[in-house]
Amino acid sequence: MQDLQQMAIFGGVSDEALQFLLARTRRTELAAGSYFMREGDTGTGLFVLLQGRVAVLRRWNDRQMLLRELGPGDCFGEMALLDLGPRSASIKVMQDCSALEMGTGLLHEFFEHDPRQFALMQMNIARELSRRLRTTFDLLFAASTPSERDLIEGILRRT
């Protein structure tokens, strides 16, 4: 239980709330080379990685770009739950993985069971998304050449 509470998504979540979630989560095991999800799929839940490593990949033109790698304690799939959009990236298993899968139905049950603990977990997810966005901004604005800066300015004007 304490191991889970060290993970960003479960930080501060009570033992009782974790027991409620764990009793209803599905444990997913996938081998290296397989995918948890593919970009464009319908979001059905989020995953918390217990063991292994995954790559977060996104298509750009005709290439698949590595956005980042995730390891034990990291979560993924949360964006589709929050914005109800399709999966924004593919998650490829780099090392055999074990993960907890929390579907949308479970999250609704959790809200009904304990709204305060649900809100805490949602805040944890928001903090993680904020950290990732901050890292992306740092990388984006680290452009050093004039052509890189022109490219970034062009992209930002489109939004």
Image (cartoon, rainbow, N blue to C red):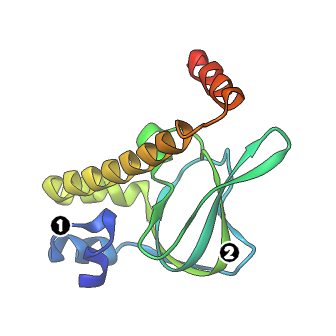
- The relative height of residue 88 versus residue 5 in the rendered view (above or below) is above
**Mark 2 highlights which residue?**
94
- The relative height of residue 48 versus residue 106 in the rendered view (above or below) is below
Q: Residue at 46% across / 76% down in the picture?
A: 72
Residues at marks 2 and 1, CA–CA distance in whole angstroms: 30 Å
Asked if residue 81 shows in the view, the reply is no
Q: Residue at 60% across / 47% down in the picture?
A: 87
Q: Quadrant of residue 91?
A: bottom right
Residue 58 falls left or right of residue 61? left
**Mark 1 highlights which residue?**
12
State the SS at label 1.
loop
Tell me where residue 145 appears, x and y as whole percent.
Answer: 67, 33
Q: Residue at 20% across / 55% down in the picture?
A: 120
Question: Looking at the picture, which amino acid does disc 2 mark?
Answer: Met
Please tell me how crowded label 2 is: few (under 14), some (14-19), or many (20+) other residues with Cα within 10 Å: some
Question: Looking at the picture, which amino acid does disc 1 mark?
Answer: Gly
Q: Residue at 67% across / 31% down in the picture?
A: 148
